Image (tube, helix red, strand yellow):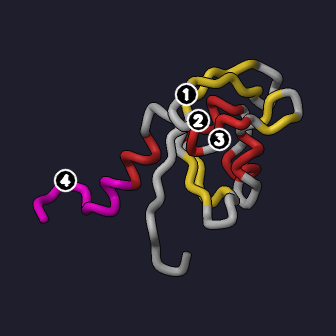
Amino acid sequence: MAEGFLTPLSLLATIVKTAPDALVVVDGDGLIMFANEQTSRVFGYRRQELMGEPFEILLEEDGETEEAATPAAEGHLQHVRARDGRRVPVEVRTSSVPFEGG
């Protein structure tokens, strides 16, 4: 590989880390395995606080889980509450990616 170029894995990691959108990876049980820095900026949680938490923690509004997390509502704009109480417009998109060990 030419000097100065990223390996495919390094390139992917850089894209995910620097994406302008909040990106969250959940396991089969719906628990957060990864959240990029933009997720922290949007929702106000430190990334470490989200690890192992249910994905629904990011979809709560006034203490009630939003129904917009369901596949039927995927892609629709919804408002959720950030940690500090701000209303944040979000659009939920999902995709399933099989991986070894999960």
Residue holding disc 2: 73
* Contact, mark 2 vs mark 3 (Cβ under 8 Å): yes
Helix, strand or loop for disc 1: loop
- Kindly identify the amino acid type of the residue bearing the numbered disc 4: Gly
The answer to whether mark 1 and mark 2 are in CB contact below 8 A is yes
Quick one: label 3 or label 4, which is nearer the N terminus? 4
Estimate the spatial distance between the alpha carbons at disc 2 and disc 3, rounded to whole Å.
7 Å
Under tag 4, what secondary structure?
loop
Tell me where residue 91 sits by quadrant: top right
Which residue occupies 57% across, 48% down? 24
> Magenta residues, as a range?
1-12
Give the mark nearest the N terminus, 1 or 4.
4
Left or right placement of residue 12 versus residue 67 in this view: left
Q: Amino acid at mark 3?
A: Ala
- The mark closer to the camera, 3 or 4, is 3
Which sits in the foreground, 83 or 74? 74
**Residue 40: x percent and y percent?**
64, 37
Q: Are marks 1 and 4 in contact (CB under 8 Å)?
A: no
Identify which amino acid the numbered label 2 is placed on. Ala
Quarter of the image containing the N terminus? Answer: bottom left
Mark 1: give few (<14), some (14-19) or many (20+) Cα within 10 Å: few
Give the quadrant of the C terminus: bottom right
Q: Mark 1 belongs to which amino acid?
A: His
33 in relation to 94, above or below: below
Is residue 86 a member of the stretch shown in magenta? no
Image height of 5 relative to 66, above or below: below
